[in-house]
């Protein structure tokens, strides 16, 4: 975020100008429609990550995928509250919140109550919780602008923030979703596409271990379609993880100097 | 919640590995399902489902409301699950919130389909009375009375049974002489009821992974040993209508695909069993 207003326009991926067009109506058999931002069906938005967005946090990251902008801070490990029972593995406390101005209609984002528990479930399998017994790690995510595929961006950004905080993980967690629109499967849907979607599939995975930590499917899917969607997502996840890794490497080498 | 000794843990895990579980079932066998319909007279439809020690009640209430402006040709359905502290002491106070939300969200995902409404188990357009003006709001409430594992499958079955038990009153729209008025007048019949079409409502099959194998319809003891669980809802056509994963441990993508095909197979049996149970319950309700 600091990079946006400041004088460092070097590595910044410019976000496309907000279009004020009327949303196109997707017809079932229409194979020729163009996505609102002109991408191919199987093309992801440019991903941008930067660590160290919040100074006070143990680790933090800012992610921007097109118009979706999120910031995640990680605090801890800190001592678990006295009321909690003894636990010989660490606890993970996740919270996802929306700013009131994140959505086109003010304050609409708060109806995503389940996002916090989804974030928790996506991350807990990747973190070595046994490395910090009796303590708690807080992961707080804030969606600054909701531009579609919010949860996958939050999850990916959170794993970069955890890595920045030095929390031990088995692997980075990358997350990608696809939307089903009629007969087509589009990857990394924007808000407009999500509101028209017939179904969606979201995968969070650890690409180097080739393990799926979380998977949700909504809407009606046939098995071949699930296959296709999963392959697309897994492929995109491994590419996304490379971007995340290079961001962390950059940050590490910059701090060495 | 479940306190097990090391020996008991080994016994459960060993049994699952040998395809003979502690209650004598095979890995993919369900416990017997008992369905009772029309248990709550106050509701438009209700059902109670028992699977072993798991005991849940689902009710459907219909109220007239206004359709949302974005989708004027569709009714609204909301699903809410409550876990009673009579079932488990840990559900007391705020203790049940996490589980309740998780169950509600999974059921919404399975039954309501995508944002555009396609693939939904409940046909929302059949709930419209006057387009853009009046529609039925369905409130589906689930209550966990007693919990012994596999709550999601039981709740899914109970909701399916409650929906097929639901009668929606026929509504007469008064011929609107004053057409400018916002809300047309309606007359709700208390004699004529419309049956709800539940052929599209999916069943939910949860496969719980314990050790290297996965089992259907896990008891609470078996669930305490799980590494992860995948709940898959399958409709009559054999299409997947929703999938939720629980548990932190990662799964190989090929295992997930394998689980999906197994779940499809298991769901056929479950669907037939459930349909015959619902029919039997409806018949015995008519007799009494």
Image (spheres, coloured by chain):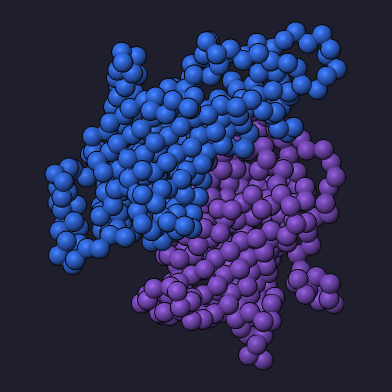
Chain colours: A purple, B blue
Q: Is residue A59 left or right of residue B11?
A: right
Please state which of residues A89 and B210 is positioned toward the viewer in this rendering: A89
Is A229 above or below relative to A245?
above
Q: Is residue A105 left or right of residue A173?
A: right
Write the residue at 54% across / 33% down.
B139
Q: Position of residue A38 (x, y in %)?
A: 75, 46
Q: Position of residue B179 (x, y in %)?
A: 83, 14
Is B49 above or below relative to B9?
above
Please state which of residues B55 and A26 is positioned toward the viewer in this rendering: B55
Q: Is residue B179 left or right of residue A232?
A: right
Query: Can residue A127 be seen from the camera position used here?
Result: yes
Count of picture labels: 0
Please state which of residues A169 and B6 is positioned toward the viewer in this rendering: B6
Q: Which quarter of the figure is the C terminus of chain B placed in?
A: top left
Q: Which quarter of the figure is the N terminus of chain B placed in?
A: bottom left
Q: Residue furthest bottom?
A: A257
Q: Position of residue B213 (x, y in %)?
A: 25, 52
Query: Can residue A237 be seen from the camera position used here?
Result: no
């Amino acid at each position: 975020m600091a990079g946006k207003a400041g004088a460092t326009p070097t590595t910044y991926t410019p976000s496309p100008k907000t279009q004020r067009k009327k949303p196109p109506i997707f017809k079932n058999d229409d194979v020729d429609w163009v996505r609102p931002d002109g991408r191919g069906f199987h093309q992801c938005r440019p991903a941008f990550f930067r660590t160290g967005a919040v100074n006070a946090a143990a680790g933090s990251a800012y992610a921007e995928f097109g118009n979706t902008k999120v910031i995640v801070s990680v605090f801890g490990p800190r001592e678990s509250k006295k009321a909690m029972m003894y636990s010989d593995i660490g606890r993970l406390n996740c919270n996802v919140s929306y700013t009131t101005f994140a959505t086109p209609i003010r304050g609409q984002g708060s109806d995503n109550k389940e996002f916090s528990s989804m974030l928790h479930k996506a991350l807990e399998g990747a973190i070595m919780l046994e490395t910090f017994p009796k303590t708690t790690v807080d992961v707080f995510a804030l969606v600054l602008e909701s531009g579609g595929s919010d949860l996958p961006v939050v999850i990916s950004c959170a794993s970069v923030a955890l890595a920045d905080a030095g929390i031990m993980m088995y692997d980075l967690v990358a997350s990608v979703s696809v939307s089903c629109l009629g007969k087509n499967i589009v990857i990394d849907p924007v808000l407009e596409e999500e509101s028209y979607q017939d179904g969606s599939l979201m995968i969070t995975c650890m690409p180097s271990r080739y393990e799926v930590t979380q998977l949700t499917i909504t809407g009606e899917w046939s098995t071949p379609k699930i296959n296709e969607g999963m392959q697309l997502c897994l492929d995109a996840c491994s590419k996304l993880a490379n971007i995340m890794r290079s961001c962390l490497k950059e940050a590490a080498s910059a701090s060495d100097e | 919640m479940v306190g097990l000794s090391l020996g008991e843990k080994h016994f459960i895990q060993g049994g699952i590995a040998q395809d003979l579980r502690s209650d004598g079932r095979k890995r993919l066998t369900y416990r017997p399902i008992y369905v009772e319909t029309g248990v709550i007279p106050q509701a438009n439809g209700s059902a109670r489902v028992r699977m072993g020690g798991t005991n849940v009640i689902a009710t459907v209430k219909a109220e007239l409301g206004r359709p949302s402006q974005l989708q004027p040709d569709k009714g609204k359905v909301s699903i809410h699950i409550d876990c009673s502290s009579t079932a488990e002491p840990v559900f007391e106070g705020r203790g049940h919130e996490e589980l309740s939300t998780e169950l509600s969200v999974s059921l919404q995902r399975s039954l309501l389909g995508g944002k555009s409404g396609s693939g939904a188990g409940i046909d929302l357009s059949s709930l419209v009375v006057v387009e853009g003006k009046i529609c039925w709001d369905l409130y589906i409430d689930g209550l966990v009375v007693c919990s012994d594992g596999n709550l999601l499958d039981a709740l899914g079955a109970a909701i399916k049974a409650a929906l097929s038990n639901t009668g929606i009153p026929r509504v007469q729209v008064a011929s609107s002489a004053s057409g400018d008025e916002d809300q047309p007048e309606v007359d709700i019949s208390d004699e004529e009821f419309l049956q709800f079409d539940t052929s599209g409502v999916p069943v939910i099959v949860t496969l719980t992974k314990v050790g290297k194998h996965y089992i259907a319809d896990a008891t609470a003891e078996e669930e305490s040993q799980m590494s992860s669980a995948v709940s898959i809802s399958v409709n009559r056509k054999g299409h997947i209508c929703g999938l939720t994963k629980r548990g932190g441990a990662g799964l190989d993508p090929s295992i997930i695909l394998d689980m999906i095909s197994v779940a499809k197979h298991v769901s056929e049996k479950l669907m037939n069993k459930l349909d015959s149970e619902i029919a039997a319950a409806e018949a015995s309700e008519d007799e009494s």
